Structures are given as structure tokens and as C-alpha cells.
Image (cartoon, rainbow, N blue to C red):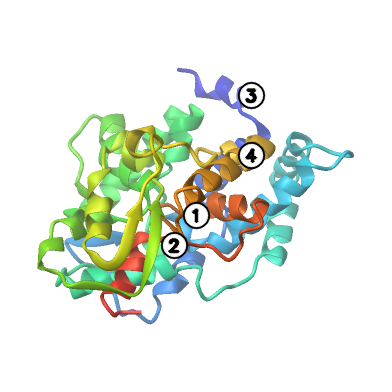
Amino acid sequence: MNTDSNRELIPPGLTYLADNITSKHNILGAAKGAGAKWAKDLNLPKEAETIFFAGCGYQYASELEAMMGLIRSIDKSSVVNTEMAMGLANFQKKLGFDATGILRRVMSKDREDDAAALKDAVKVLRKLGIEFGYLGDDEPCCAGMLYYMGLHKEFKQNSRQITDGLKAKKIKKIISIIPSCTNTLRQLVPQSIGEEGLEVKHFSEVVAEKISSLDLRYPKTIKVAYHDPCQLSRYMKLVEEPRRILRAIKGIELVETKFTNGDCTTCCGGGGGFEAVFPEMSQILATNRAKELLDTGAEMLITQCPGCIMQLKEGLKELKKPDVEVLDLAQVLATAMGLS
């Protein structure tokens, strides 16, 4: 596959994200270490055989939402479309001026709840007695998006660097919270370089293994609907684990859509950069999925993906239901364990 020629076929919005990954090692092109701020007071060791992999999504939640708000606003403009705007942003960036990045940072808010899922996941894992570290500034980008864009040469190079870097640190196991990062590290990276990878588990797998020993109680009785992230349910077949956890929490009643759950879940309209290329369609899909979940009678929506959370919130906004909470399973667990 000739990835040089492939770049010419990739939409400007995806090229912008790809360049961020290859140059700054995160999808937003943020300064190194900017995403690790959430963990500064948690005293997580950098050196450990098991590490917690935070990924880009939750670490840059505000900036991602701001960027998507900007893209959707541009797409609705009659003066300029998204493709033209992102193409111009790419050109300016090559000249050393990232206008989109500057505007994105101005629009974003440094919210306290941005990394709530990460902090709560750490609390839960510690409560379970699991010893682990966090690489902080040194955490690499899994670069899974490069693979899905067809930039397989760049992805393979990144996979080699990740594998060598983690093995050099004597890391043996990874606990990852973002579905796309988990699948990339577990399956795509070792496939790409043709060698056995490290042991990689998703947060929900680790918790589900110990669920029988936990006494979980939510502070109020509430109906919740669970949205299966595509990568978690379709690629890794992790469908029963999150439901087993939710059913074990006293006070929570899990309600399901009739047909669209598990590996048949309706997509939220996000992932793989789709929302950056087709923002209008992405918004329609988000609204449709949010309505499906609300039609179950759910009072709260739960998922395990920062992209899904962003999309479902957007859908609820369109449905004029902004008061319905959308939470990561780690946040619900932490509350049920009395940790937050």
C-alpha cells in the first residue's frame, strides 16, 4: 500500500488529525505533557510492571468538544465548508501558524470534570488492590487513527516505537480505559509489527473479574441505559462485562433497547474521525442514538468512550434534554463504591 499517494485521498480534517499524531503524538497537537495534568496529585509511579493507559480522549475532552463545536459551526456556514476550512488550517500549520489550534484553545474551557473518568478509574483500581503506574508525559499515542485512515506505514512505525519503548521500561501489562486505544494496543499494534504484544486489558474486564467480591450501592434508585462503544463491543466482544458490573450495583436498574445493543448497537456517529469529515451526519446519528436510549425510560446514559460521551451529549442537546447525565462506567462505579 502506497501511503504517500493515500495522503492525497484523505479528507483535510483527517489529515489535520494525522499530522497532529505524527508530530505531537496526540490527536489535537497539544504540547507534550498537557494531557497528563489530571494525574499530578495522584502520586502514581512512572515505573511499574502494570501501567494505566489514559489515552487522548479524556485527557483533552474540553479541547475536543471545542474543536467539534467549531467544525459543526463551520459546516453550517454558507460561506465556507469544513473541507475548505480544514485544508486552510493544514496549510497554515505547515507554515508554522496553527490558527485552528489557537481558536480551539480559546474556545475550550478548563473544566474540573474533564478527567473525572480517569481519576475515578484510578480510585476504583486502587480500591481493588491493583498496583499500577502511569507514564504521564511519556505516555505514547496509540495512533490507531492512522491505521483507520489507511496510513499503514506511519502506523507501523509508531507501533514499533511504542512496543520498543514500553518493553524498554520493563512494562508487562496495560490497563486501558478508552476502547479504541485498548483495541489498538491489544490487536492492531502486534499485528502491524508481526510479534506478540503486551498483555492489554480494558478497565471493565479488570473490574468484572473482581465484581463478586464487591458490595456496590448507588446513592439513589435510577434507571440507566448502557451504550456499547463500537470498538469495545464489535471488535473486542466486551458486551457482558459492563452489564455484569451495572447489574451488581444496588439502586441501578439497567434498561435496554430492544434490538440495538451489544454488537448490534446503533453507532453514536463518532469515531475514526467521521465527525470531523461528516459533522452534519454525525450530529444526526448522535441524536438518533440518544433518542433510542431515552425511549427505554432511562434517566441516565452510561458508556465507556469519551467520543461516545461527547456524541450522546450532543444528541441530548438537540433533543432538548441537556439535564440527562452521560457518564463513564468508571464514574458510576466510583460513586457506588463511595469513592466520589
Categorize mark 3 by other alpha carbons within 10 Å: few (<14), some (14-19), many (20+). few
70 left or right of 255? Answer: right
* Quadrant the C terminus occupies: bottom left
What residue occupies the far left of the structure in this picture?
Answer: 213
Label located before the other in sequence (2 or 4): 4
Label 4 close to label 3 by CB (< 8 Å):
no
| 8 up-or-down from 177: above or below | above
Q: Nearer the viewer, residue 283 or 323?
A: 323
The amino acid on which the numbered mark 1 sits, given as a three-letter code, is: Ile
Q: Residue at x 35, y 60 (%)?
A: 329
| 84 up-or-down from 23: above or below | above
Q: Residue at x 23, y 45 (%)?
A: 240
Q: Which residue is mark 1?
A: 309
- In whole angstroms, how far apart are the C-alphas of marks 1 and 2? 7 Å
In the rendering, which numbered label is found on residue 13?
A: none
31 left or right of 79? Answer: left
Instruction: Give the structural element (helix, strand or loop) at label 1.
Output: helix
Label 1 close to label 2 by CB (< 8 Å):
yes
- In whole angstroms, how far apart are the C-alphas of marks 2 and 3? 38 Å
Q: Is residue 202 visible?
A: no
Categorize mark 2 by other alpha carbons within 10 Å: few (<14), some (14-19), many (20+). many
Instruction: Give the structural element (helix, strand or loop) at label 4.
Output: helix
Label located before the other in sequence (4 or 3): 3
Q: Residue 32 at what x, y percent from top left?
A: 50, 62
Q: Which residue is mark 3?
A: 8
Q: Which residue is mark 4?
A: 284
- In whole angstroms, how far apart are the C-alphas of marks 4 and 3? 28 Å
What residue occupies the far top of the structure in this picture?
Answer: 1
- In whole angstroms, how far apart are the C-alphas of marks 1 and 4? 15 Å
Q: Residue 313 at what x, y percent from top left?
A: 57, 56
Label located before the other in sequence (1 or 2): 1
Label located before the other in sequence (1 or 4): 4
